[in-house]
Image (tube, rainbow, N blue to C red):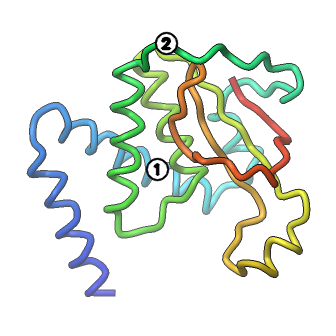
Amino acid sequence: MTGRIALARRKLASAWRLGGRRGLLVAEASVLLLGARIAVATLPFRRVARWLGTPVSPGALIPPAPRERPDDAATMVSWAVRFAAGRLPVEAVCLPQAIAARAMLKRRGIAATLHLGVWRDHREAVKIDPDTPPAHAWLDASGQRIAGYPVDPALIEVAAFV
């Protein structure tokens, strides 16, 4: 465990060296990722779902037109969440990343949609890779990919939150 903490310290030091606006973004992403990771690990999903947004049927969503130019704030949030997730001493997988990114986007006034999907045939996916999780989360904002991409085509979207 001590080696893991030392490694995390070195990784987080690289974030600290960023300084300025990027450093603050990574700090914000790190705090939100840790909070989301703890919530996902300890709370029943129905409690976590309250923070995901308003549930809608995936079939009711109209796919947004792709943006001509990506939103710079959304791009920076996406980068900060990925950067922080790779440097934390705990594993922050798709759902904590999507929750953290959604909170950061909401704080900046950017609407986002969080999607949840399951494998068409989870047993077959586990045969191929035993570490395959039973579900996946991804986040987009006005057609811009924020977290959890690429999405495997073998996933079936079962829920969306706006």
Please tell me which residue is depicted at 48% across the width and 41% down the height of the picture: 100
Mark 2 lies on residue: 68
Splitting the image into 4 quarters, where does residue 12 fall? bottom left
x then y, percent, for residue 141: 56, 23
Splitting the image into 4 quarters, where does residue 161 fall? top right
Please tell me which residue is depicted at 31% across the width and 62% down the height of the picture: 87
Q: Can you tell which of label 1 and label 2 is closer to the viewer?
A: 2
Q: Is residue 23 left or right of residue 113?
A: left
Please tell me which residue is depicted at 60% across the width and 50% down the height of the picture: 95
Q: Nearer the viewer, residue 123 or 9?
A: 123
Above or below 81: residue 13: below
Res 108 label: none
Above or below 71: residue 135: below
First reached walking from the N terminus: tag 1 or tag 2? 1
Mark 1 lies on residue: 35
Tell me if mark 1 has few (under 14), some (14-19) or many (20+) residues whose alpha carbon lies within 10 angstroms of its own. some
Please tell me which residue is depicted at 77% across the width and 44% down the height of the picture: 46
Q: Is residue 80 left or right of residue 13?
A: right
Q: Amino acid type of disc 1?
A: Gly
Residues at marks 1 and 2, CA–CA distance in whole angstroms:
34 Å
Please identify the quadrant where the C terminus is shown.
Answer: top right
x then y, percent, for residue 48: 67, 44
